[in-house]
Image (spheres, rainbow, N blue to C red):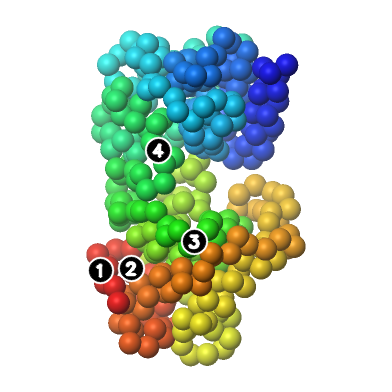
């Protein structure tokens, strides 16, 4: 009964994940991880469970996988034997041996690997290669173990955010949100995702999402990469400098028609964005149907949180004295701050 329950939970999660373009072959590893004698006190000592974490990463982090299995969060380090199985005995994990041995794992689980899985499996490898900064070489045992143990921890940042040199500007320091954030920035950006492919700065949710990301020392480019699902190829994710200027009407929507955006405007706009929030009524990424959910929040624990990130915008635009930012200044911040290497504070 316990095995069935775990399987049902994870199968349900992966049904939702199908919209996130997981390889179809990943479903077979879901069952294998549950039905095989998996020791939940040593999840990464099980080949199927480790392969499952790799193939499901477009939807769930390793930490979330452990939670779905009902296992303890405190797991031993990745087994050397499991690593050898995944690499086929090679000392490093490469895109080639990962794909070959993933296909073998699927076959052992009774699943079918199809040609449609190829591109998705390659993208999965690139995610880990970027995180471990091994874009030009293989991933070592210690690197993969580090990814499994730490990639989902708050404040632990990828060594390189992309294996595509075009996105070098995105490789910026990141950190954790202040305690007062209370999940509000993630809630704003979840709404941004509903419209981002139509031009991020054409809606206030993405603008406010970029602003609150600054509280974690992250640029608008970093925000965009996090809003786009991980299965989207790097070359299809725009940078802040390529998506055009902030429209004046979006700015005025946040200011109530005023020529400058004040701290109070920022507070009001941020709280408004978290009231009766939008959710998706269905459709794949880029073609979702936004509807009002009737739900509110989560709001920041204190408006001081908004002051924290707005003061950074005021500093970048040279307005620490008034905390009032003009339209052109905010548009400049969104378009150019990711590549400016200029990070002043008030």
Q: Which mark is residue 342?
A: 1
Compared with 230, 340 (above or below) is: below
Q: Which mark is residue 151?
A: 4
Compared with 275, 226 (above or below) is: above
Of badges 2 and 4, nearer the viewer stands 4
Image point 67% across, 22% down: which residue?
Answer: 7
Mark 2 and mark 1 residues within 8 Å of each other at the beta carbon = yes
User: Dot 4, how many residues are within 10 Å of its Cα: few (below 14), some (14-19), or many (20+)?
Assistant: many
Labels 3 and 2: the sequence-earlier one: 3
**Image position, residue 319 (x, y; %):** 34, 84
Q: CA distance from mark 2 to mark 1?
A: 7 Å
Q: CA distance from mark 3 to mark 2?
A: 22 Å
User: Dot 2, how many residues are within 10 Å of its Cα: few (below 14), some (14-19), or many (20+)?
Assistant: many
**Image position, residue 296 (x, y; %):** 67, 63
Which picture quadrant has residue 37?
top right
Labels 4 and 1: the sequence-earlier one: 4
**Image position, residue 337 (x, y; %):** 33, 68
Q: Which residue is mark 3?
A: 181
Q: Nearer the viewer, residue 43 or 97?
A: 43
Mark 3 and mark 2 residues within 8 Å of each other at the beta carbon = no
Q: Secondary structure at mark 4?
A: loop
Labels 2 and 4: the sequence-earlier one: 4
Q: Which residue is mark 2?
A: 337
Q: Nearer the viewer, residue 163 or 257?
A: 257
Q: CA distance from mark 2 to mark 4?
A: 26 Å
Labels 3 and 4: the sequence-earlier one: 4
Image point 36% across, 53% down: which residue?
Answer: 175
User: Dot 3, how many residues are within 10 Å of its Cα: few (below 14), some (14-19), or many (20+)?
Assistant: many
Q: CA distance from mark 4 to mark 1?
A: 27 Å
Image point 24% across, 64% down: which residue?
Answer: 341
């Amino acid at each position: 009964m316990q095995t069935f329950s775990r399987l049902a939970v994870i199968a349900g999660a992966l049904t939702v994940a199908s919209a996130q373009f997981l390889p179809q072959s990943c479903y077979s590893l879901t069952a294998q991880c549950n039905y095989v004698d998996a020791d939940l006190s040593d999840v990464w000592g099980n080949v199927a469970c480790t392969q499952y974490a790799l193939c499901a990463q477009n939807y769930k982090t390793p930490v979330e996988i452990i939670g779905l299995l009902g296992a303890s969060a405190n797991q031993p380090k990745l087994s050397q034997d499991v690593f050898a199985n995944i690499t086929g005995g090679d000392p490093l994990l490469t895109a080639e041996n990962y794909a070959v041995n993933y296909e073998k794992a699927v076959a052992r689980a009774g699943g079918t690997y199809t040609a449609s899985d190829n591109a998705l499996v390659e993208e999965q490898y690139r995610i880990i290669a970027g995180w471990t900064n091994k874009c030009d070489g293989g991933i070592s045992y210690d690197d993969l173990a580090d990814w499994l143990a730490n990639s989902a921890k708050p404040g632990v940042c990828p060594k390189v955010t992309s294996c595509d040199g075009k996105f070098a500007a995105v490789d910026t320091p990141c950190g954790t949100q202040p305690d007062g954030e209370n999940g509000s920035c993630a809630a704003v950006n979840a709404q941004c995702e509903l419209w981002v492919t139509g031009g991020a700065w054409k809606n206030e949710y993405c603008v406010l999402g970029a602003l609150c990301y600054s509280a974690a020392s992250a640029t608008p480019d970093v925000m965009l990469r996090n809003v786009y699902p991980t299965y989207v190829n790097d070359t299809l994710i725009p940078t802040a400098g390529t998506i055009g200027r902030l429209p004046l009407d979006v700015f005025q929507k946040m200011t109530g028609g005023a020529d400058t955006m004040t701290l109070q405007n920022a507070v009001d706009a941020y709280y408004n964005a978290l009231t009766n929030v939008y959710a998706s009524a269905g459709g794949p990424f880029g073609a979702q149907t936004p509807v009002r959910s009737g739900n509110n929040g989560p709001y920041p624990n204190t408006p001081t949180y908004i002051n924290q990130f707005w003061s950074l915008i005021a500093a970048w635009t040279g307005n620490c004295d008034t905390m009032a930012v003009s339209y052109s200044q905010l548009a400049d911040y969104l378009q150019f701050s990711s590549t400016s290497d200029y990070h002043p504070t008030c």
